[in-house]
Image: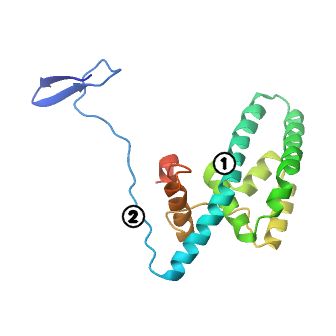
Amino acid sequence: MSIYAQTDSLPMVILPGEKTPQSYIGLDEVVVYQPVKLNSYEEMKKYMLLRRRVIKVYPYAELASERFVTLKERLDRMDSRRQKKRYAKLIEKYLEGEFSEELKKLTRKEGQILVKLIHRETGITTHALVKTYRNGLRASVYQFTAKLFDIDLKTEFNPSEVQEDMWIEDILFRSGLTTTYFEENPEKF
């Protein structure tokens, strides 16, 4: 319920939960972007193939994000560095056992998309995650191994500059899998 008051010819409004009248209502910035336009049959084929790949790997990225948040919370509660390293190693072994067979079945392109989606979901590149929570040597080994399969663990998700990333964002939004990247990352725009 809003109550209106008139002072100095500016309408005043009291918003629900507020006690003081305000002459304006502050709104968050909204970013509007054009819907994806596919100009040829070839672009449509690429888009549909990308859509299938994104829908296949997005659950892994979402799960990685959830596990990352849980890991971060638990590590923040631990005191000693040794305890943190031991716990991170334990989680790494658990994740390898749980997902390695499924992830080995991904194609190169699906792996590239997964790396981008992990960055989108966590805000940190896959390489930086490994380097932070394990060590630099392990991150370098993983990066080298990924490069053998034409995957760069340092790849970032950037829909405002990379067309494929813009398509990925469009696919996720249209599929109802997530809100837009721009809503989740307003500080980047």
Q: Residue 64 location in percent, x, y?
A: 72, 48
Is 40 placed left or right of 138 in the picture? left
- Characterize the local packing of mark 2: few (<14), some (14-19) or many (20 or more) Cα atoms within 10 angstroms: few
Which residue is identified by label 1?
62
The N terminus: image quadrant = top left
Q: SS at mark 1?
A: helix
Q: Is residue 188 left or right of residue 9?
A: right
Q: Can see residue 29?
A: yes
Q: Viewer-proximal residue, 101 or 129?
A: 101
Find residue 96 and report its horizontal and vertical position in percent. Answer: 86, 51
Residue at (79% x, 52% y) in the render: 131
Please give the residue where the numbered disc 2 appears in the rendered image.
Answer: 34
* Residue found at x 15% / y 22%: 5
Q: Farthest top residue?
A: 19
- Secondary structure at badge 2 equals loop
Q: Quadrant of residue 90?
A: top right
